[in-house]
């Protein structure tokens, strides 16, 4: 039952043309412990994919596998492929710095640096060695606009970012991710520390961002997954149980465990 | 994790719907019997029951909306609430059609009968069968039974067409039959609508159980 994997035929057909990420027979190990088992998942350009499932099922591990953030963990290794734009990111030839520029990441806890709002946003450009002042200023403004934060901070760009509210800090982190012009955004429970209003702002932002970005979001909030995503994948014990169009998963999932999980009858 | 409250509320919805359906079934049966048994009093009872149906509809609709707003159900739970919302409005309309028929029966039931008895009773009995079967399919979540309602709707459609033609012929021959004939045409039209509503309920049952729309299946092929 657990090994059965249902892929909505509509998902499959759509992958051919616009596929940006293709995870193929992917396994992940923390040393002796296997955290992900034979994952096959593809994500299309300018769509939002939600990853849902109980804590510890491997959602964050999978997310971090897509921009090789797991490389830093001692003893961790992978099997299988993660293709981004048709290139195997675990191949030796992959430029990891460029990969991480192309794939931005936003975490559960907003993590602004104790610097000015401006310096937080342009951080990625600075470490990439960019010095063109005008370019940096334009990029910062554009990123803050895209993150829906510009109007709130435009008069205080030199103030310390730690003075922003939680919701503003999270949007600042999104602006920081956007500033290096990535193609893909990975979001790991980006709203779990936010109040409902700040959450709504981030959700609206995600909706707008998907016009230009491909987004994968981990969320524990079923309503949020239903509201923001085009596709939803359900993970359980390191396995991808079911993936399909979000409206299908939330109205008529094919697998019993998925149904039990989303309708709150798990375990 | 558990959903004790949601489960209780869904059970309450189901019970409420069963009670409402039971009353509607009684209205339909009394309507048919009003003419079959030549008893105008049965028709009057139908008119009295109608108010109770409206109250059930309002109460159940509120319960559904409360569950949607407060419990935000998904998957099967969501489908149960969505189908209940639609089924209660179908039930309410079946009640309305029974009232329409009963009012006309009250007018004509004591007049000297003509050829039309057999047809009127037949279309009424067939429609009543579909109503009962659609309710049973809901209570037993039996999709095969629901599908048989959709198929057998045809029987009522054909009876309607046949009776309509016959009544028209009689009215053309005998101008004195026009008043009674026009009552009868409206009566059979209402029976035909009741059978359609039973079909709609059967389609909701299929959606609730299987998760796909049983209506207009040709539309599904677009996806
Ligand atoms: N750095 C790590 N070292 C060893 N095991 C880990 C590490 N990070 C996560 N895990 C384990 O891998 C599994 C998946 O974790 P994770 O991807 O964080 O799940 P999720 O994000 O779905 O809650 C869990 O059993 C967790 O304990
Ligand atoms: Mg996690």
Image (cartoon, rainbow, N blue to C red):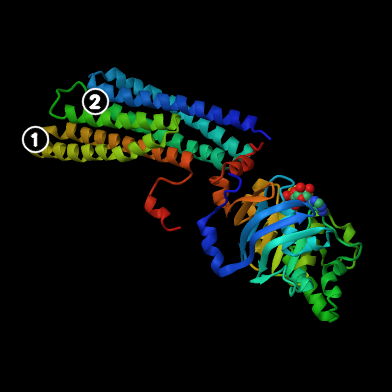
Element at badge 1?
loop
Residue at horizontal 53 percent and vertical 30 percent from the top: B13
Residue at horizontal 76 percent and vertical 64 percent from the top: A68
Is ligand 1 closer than 8 angstroms to the Cβ of mark 1? no
Q: Nearer the viewer, residue A122 or B137?
A: B137
The answer to whether residue A209 is seen in the rendering is no
Rendering coords of residue B102 (x, y %): 30, 26
Rendering coords of residue B71 (x, y %): 63, 37
Q: Residues within 10 Å of mark 1 (few under 14, many from 20)?
A: few
Rendering coords of residue B145 (x, y %): 37, 34
Chain letter of mark 2 equals B
Earlier in the chain: of badge 2 and badge 1, it is: 2
Chain letter of mark 1 equals B
**In the depicted structure, whether residue A11 falls above or below residue A56:** below
Element at badge 2?
helix
Q: Is residue B95 left or right of residue A32?
A: left
Q: Which residue is mark 2?
A: B107
- Which quarter shows the N terminus of chain B? top right
Q: Which residue is mark 1?
A: B174
Q: Nearer the viewer, residue B26 or A37?
A: A37
* Real-space Cα separation, disc 2 to disc 1, in angstroms: 20 Å
Residue at horizontal 42 percent and vertical 33 percent from the top: B142
Residue B5 position by quadrant = top right
Residue at horizontal 29 percent and vertical 30 percent from the top: B101
Q: Is residue B177 left or right of residue B83?
A: left
**In the depicted structure, whether residue B75 falls above or below residue A58:** above
Question: Going by the picture, which residue comes out furthest to the front?
Answer: A32
């Amino acid at each position: 039952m657990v090994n059965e994997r249902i892929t909505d035929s509509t998902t499959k057909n759509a992958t051919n043309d616009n596929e940006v990420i293709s995870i193929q027979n992917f396994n992940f190990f923390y040393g002796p412990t296997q955290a992900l088992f034979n994952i096959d998942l593809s994500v299309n350009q300018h769509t939002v994919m939600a990853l849902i499932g109980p804590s510890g099922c491997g959602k964050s591990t999978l997310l971090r596998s897509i921009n090789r953030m797991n490389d830093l963990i001692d003893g961790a290794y992978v099997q299988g492929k993660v293709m981004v734009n048709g290139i195997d990111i675990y191949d030796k030839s992959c430029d990891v710095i460029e990969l991480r520029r192309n794939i931005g990441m936003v975490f559960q806890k907003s993590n602004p640096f104790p610097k000015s709002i401006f310096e937080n946003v342009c951080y990625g450009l600075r470490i990439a060695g960019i010095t063109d002042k005008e370019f940096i200023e334009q990029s910062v403004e554009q990123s803050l606009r895209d993150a829906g934060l510009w109007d709130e901070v435009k008069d205080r760009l030199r103030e310390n970012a730690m003075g922003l509210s939680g919701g503003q800090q999270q949007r600042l982190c999104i602006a920081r991710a956007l500033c290096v012009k990535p193609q893909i955004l990975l979001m790991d429970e980006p709203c779990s520390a936010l109040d409902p209003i700040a959450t709504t702002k981030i959700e609206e932002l995600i909706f707008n961002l998907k016009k230009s970005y491909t987004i994968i979001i981990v969320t524990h909030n079923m309503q949020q997954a239903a509201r923001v995503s085009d596709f939803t994948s359900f993970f359980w014990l390191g396995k991808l149980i079911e993936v399909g169009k979000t409206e299908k998963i939330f109205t008529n999932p094919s697998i019993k465990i998925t149904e039990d999980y989303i309708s709150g009858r798990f375990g | 994790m558990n959903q004790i409250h949601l489960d209780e509320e869904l059970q309450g919805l189901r019970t409420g719907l069963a009670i409402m359906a039971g009353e509607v079934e009684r209205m339909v049966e009394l309507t048919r019997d009003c003419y079959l048994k030549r008893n105008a009093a049965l028709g009057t009872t139908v008119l009295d029951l109608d108010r109770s149906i409206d109250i059930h509809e309002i109460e159940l609709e509120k319960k559904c909306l409360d569950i949607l707003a407060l419990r935000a159900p998904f998957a099967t739970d969501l489908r149960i609430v969505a189908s209940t919302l639609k089924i209660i409005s179908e039930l309410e309309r079946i009640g309305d059609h029974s009232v329409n028929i009963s009012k006309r029966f009250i007018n004509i039931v004591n007049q000297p009968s003509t050829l039309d008895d057999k047809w009127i009773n037949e279309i009424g009995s067939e429609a009543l069968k579909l109503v009962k079967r659609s309710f049973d399919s809901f209570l037993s979540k039996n999709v095969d039974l629901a599908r048989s309602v959709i198929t057998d709707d045809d029987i009522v459609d054909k009876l309607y067409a046949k009776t309509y033609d016959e009544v028209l012929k009689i009215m053309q021959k005998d101008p004195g039959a026009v008043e009674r004939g026009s009552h009868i045409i409206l009566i059979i039209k209402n029976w035909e609508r009741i059978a359609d509503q039973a079909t709609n309920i059967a389609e909701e049952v299929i959606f609730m159980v299987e998760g796909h729309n049983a209506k207009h299946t040709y539309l599904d092929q677009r996806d």
